[in-house]
């Protein structure tokens, strides 16, 4: 959202329009600015475009998928364990303004796939949602970082999402059942 605001800011000359956009970006009341402004078509359409963007392209094409390169269903492991994140047909990049066919990995513990278009929950590590927004392609499983991974059987899920953490849905997700010994 911030970068979008900056982009819009740079492309606009009219001070009143700038005030409107900044107000919208900050979710601040904009009634005062609007009442002092002519609501020309240009102003209205720019404002509408800002509200509509980003139009996330979350289509998943044939051949695009995620997988665990070093885990198979039913595998027994001991902690710590370095788990790798694999993706086919898409590109890993750090979290930023989304672009088609790019995104970052998420590791979910004992959770289902996140519906396409929904955000992978943020700040929900205690419920098993871990973001890898720096573009990481592996992580070390440990009880310290993943307290849910107590001894026993768990579902590990990879979920790919775009730069705004919007899920590509079940088509870009996979799961394995593993047993922690
Ligand atoms: Cu994320």
Image (cartoon, helix red, strand yellow):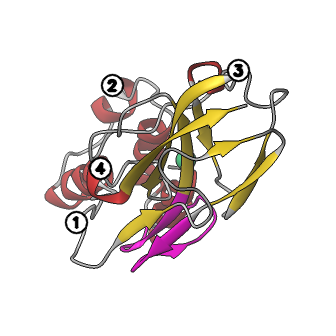
Identify the secondary structure beneath mark 3: loop
Residue 100: give x, y in percent of width and height.
Answer: 36, 73
Q: Nearer the viewer, residue 20 or 136?
A: 136
Q: Which residue is mark 2?
A: 31
Is 93 covered by the magenta stretch?
yes
Residue 54 horizontal side relative to residue 15, left or right: left
Looking at the image, is mark 1 or mark 4 nearer the viewer? 4
Q: Which residue is mark 4?
A: 169
Does mark 1's beta carbon lie closer than 8 Å to ligand 1?
no
Q: Nearer the viewer, residue 82 or 129?
A: 82
Q: Which residue is mark 3?
A: 150
Residue 59: give x, y in percent of width and height.
Answer: 22, 65
Magenta region, residue range: 86-104
Distance, label 2 to label 3, CA atoms, is 53 Å
Q: Nearer the viewer, residue 47 or 175?
A: 175
Does mark 4's beta carbon lie closer than 8 Å to ligand 1?
no
Examine the rendered structure and indicate whether residue 171 appears above or below residue 179: below
Number of residue marks: 4
Residue 81: give x, y in percent of width and height.
Answer: 78, 48
Distance, label 3 to label 1, CA atoms, is 36 Å
Mark 3 crowd level (few <14, some 14–19, many ≥20, 10 Å Cα)? some
Looking at the image, is mark 3 or mark 1 nearer the viewer? 3
Looking at the image, is mark 1 or mark 2 nearer the viewer? 1
Examine the rendered structure and indicate whether residue 115 appears above or below residue 170: above
Q: Which residue is mark 1?
A: 59
**Residue 8 position by quadrant:** bottom left
Distance, label 2 to label 4, CA atoms, is 37 Å
């Amino acid at each position: 959202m911030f970068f979008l605001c900056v982009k819009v800011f740079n492309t606009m000359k009219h001070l009143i329009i700038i005030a409107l956009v900044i107000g919208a970006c900050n979710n601040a009341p904009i009634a005062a600015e609007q009442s002092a402004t002519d609501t020309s078509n240009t102003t209205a359409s720019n404002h509408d475009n800002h509200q509509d963007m980003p139009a996330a392209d979350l289509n998943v094409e044939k051949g695009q998928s995620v997988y665990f390169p070093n885990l198979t269903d039913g595998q027994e492991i001991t902690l710590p364990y370095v788990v790798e994140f694999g993706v086919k047909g898409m590109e890993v990049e750090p979290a930023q303004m989304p672009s088609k066919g790019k995104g970052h990995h998420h590791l979910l513990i004992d959770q289902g796939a996140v519906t396409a278009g929904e955000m992978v929950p943020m700040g929900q590590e205690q419920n098993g949602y871990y973001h890898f927004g720096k573009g990481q392609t592996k992580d070390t499983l440990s009880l310290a970082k993943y307290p849910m991974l107590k001894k026993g059987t768990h579902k590990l899920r990879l979920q790919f999402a775009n730069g705004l953490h919007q899920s590509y849905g079940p088509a870009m997700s996979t799961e394995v059942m593993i047993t922690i010994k």
